[in-house]
Amino acid sequence: MTSFEDIGITIHYIKSPDYCLLSVGVGNVMINCISFESSVRPEDLVLLQEQYQQKNVSMVHLWEDIWVTRKAQVIGRISSILGLNKRIHARKTKIVSITQKQADDFLNDNHLQASAKSKYKYGLSLDDQIIAVGCFSNLRYMKGLKPGYRSAELIRFATLTGFTVIGGFSKLLKNFIQTFNPDDLMSYADRDWSLGKAYEQSGFKLTDITPPAEIWLKRDTLGRYFSHRLPVGLNNDSSSINEEYIKVYNTGNLKYILYL
């Protein structure tokens, strides 16, 4: 983990019989490093995170493949949690529509989960450079609610690695809401990494906690696949899946809704 120390972030190994724990910075962030060979259960990880949350310590679960494939993004996210980023005020930026390719390029470089397809894509531009991106779904009519009720999803939000855009999240949300006038806006926070504080500060309400999800990790590429998105011809019972894939998991998501 010398990469953290290379940018001035101190780390301390914490003795634990069951986990590989790193205390980062001044001790308000803890990283649980999980290897492919780990036999720990997802419910144990949830409990561990809740125990540290009670101590006002942010716990993140870092799987081995994420460190190998997304090291720069991991370091950037930890730097952000520690408050070490350079700060830019959103009022200095302008909102621009961007293409899917522009969103892909930015998110693949700056988001832990890389990019995802979306209907509407916006960036915050400063001096002709994109420093934040927000991606949204199409609006969907919600049956069972009032006539004409429409909901949309915030699919991705990221800032340029090493920077925090003060008010950037809210600025992109406000732009989308004023443009399309949805009745609510929904999003998910990755429970491995987030306690949902940014959503709560923006008025979102926690409405659900999804259970841990099984993930299949391809041994040669370290690509991640949910069970329902395995390549054609493969499923959980395929004879070759244990030869080509490693089974890992996440700790689920926090579902947030902003009612408008």
Image: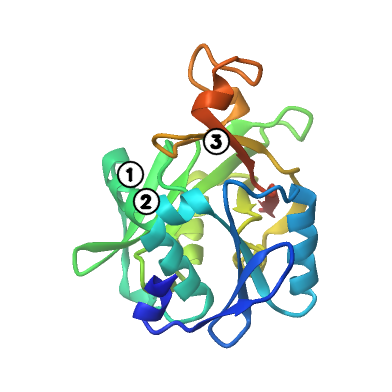
Q: Give the residue at x 60% y 18%.
A: 235
Q: Residues within 10 Å of mark 2 (few under 14, many from 20)?
A: many
Task: Tell me which label, 1 or 3, sits earlier in the chain.
Answer: 1
Which three-letter amino acid code belongs to the residue tagged 1? Asp
- The reply to whether residue 218 is in sight is yes
Which three-letter amino acid code belongs to the residue tagged 2? Leu
Which three-letter amino acid code belongs to the residue tagged 3? Leu
Residue behind mark 2: 107
Marks 2 & 1, CB-CB < 8 Å contact: yes
- The reply to whether residue 156 is in sight is no
- Against 175, residue 146 (above or below) is above
Task: Tell me which label, 3 or 2, sits earlier in the chain.
Answer: 2
- Against 133, residue 226 (above or below) is above
Q: Give the residue at x 72% y 31%.
A: 147
Q: Which label belongs to residue 139?
A: 3
> Between residues 185 and 235, which one lies in front from this camera angle?
235
Q: Give the residue at x 72% y 70%.
A: 16
| Outermost residue, left side | 128
- Against 206, residue 154 (above or below) is above
